[in-house]
Amino acid sequence: MTSQIVRVVIAGNSVIIPHSVLNGQALTPEDQRKLTEPIKEVDILLTQLAAAVPLDIMPGPTDPANSFLPQQPLHRCLFPGASAYNTFFSCTNPHQFELDGFQFLGTSGQNIDDLDKYSSAQTKLEFVERTLRWRHLAPTAPNTLGCYPFTEKDPFFIENCPNVYFVGNQDKYETALLQGPEEQEVRLVCIPRFSESGVAVMVSFNTQSCNLHYFKC
């Protein structure tokens, strides 16, 4: 199975920074350790992954990154070990990329979580489907979801239909294969929080199906 993996994407929240140390006061040596140790541990993991397979890391709401969308890539200096590999890519959130003609589009989950606060649906996956049909990743921005001001082009407008649309850091795993009006097929995926579930979602190029791989948290 591992020999068939061609890319790994971490969809945000790879690090949780304790809010207790982000109080605007001077940091004690203990507070500095609380900030740096989690990042060092993540860098060790990312280095091992980047040594074996191309790796994309996206920022999320708990990462040391700007909070407004689109979130900018995590600075490579945070991960000196992984950054030594040309297979390591620090990416934006939202993130769009192509593999062998297969189009991927994903977010770290803020767009769906915010939509859930002010609208109703039976599942989070239903919100994912709505944003795709509306062709807009963040319909609640900038009213309730922080984003940068753009005057010429909306960065959240979905111009091309993806083959896979994923959303990270959700309560549970959900997926569906959506049929478009022009016979498009889009695999929708809600990825559960890895820190709670230990679940990695693998998407097949051949069938657009999903398989789960469980890790011990």
Image: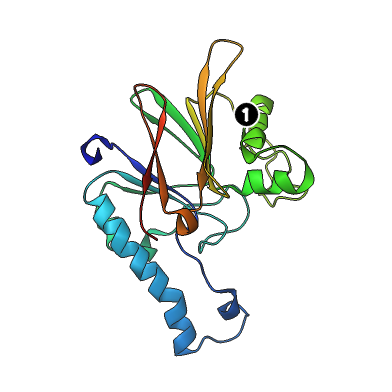
Nearer-the-camera pick, 173 or 42: 173
Residue type (three-letter) at the residue carrying disc 1: Leu
Q: Quadrant of residue 157?
A: top right
Q: Is 113 on the left or on the right of 96, as rendered?
A: right
> Which residue is at 69% across, 27% downward?
134
Instruction: Specify whether residue 94 is in view.
Output: yes
Q: Is 59 on the left or on the right of 214, as rendered?
A: right
> Which residue is at 21% across, 38% downward?
3
Q: Position of residue 30 (x, y in %)?
A: 46, 87
Q: Is 213 on the left or on the right of 71, as rendered?
A: left
> Which residue is at 57% across, 10% downward?
182
Q: Position of residue 167 (x, y in %)?
A: 54, 41
Query: Which residue is the site of mark 1?
Result: 132
Q: Position of residue 76 (x, y in %)?
A: 37, 59
Colour mapping: rainbow
Q: Is residue 31 above or below residue 16?
A: below
The N terminus is located in which quarter? top left
> Which residue is at 74% across, 43% downward?
140
Q: Position of residue 214 (x, y in %)?
A: 37, 49
SS label for mark 1: helix
Q: Is 194 on the left or on the right of 147, as rendered?
A: left
Q: How many marks?
A: 1
Instruction: Specify whether residue 141 is in view.
Output: no
Q: Is residue 186 above or below residue 189?
A: above
Badge 1 density bin: few <14, some 14–19, many ≥20, Cα 10 Å: some
The C terminus is located in which quarter? bottom left
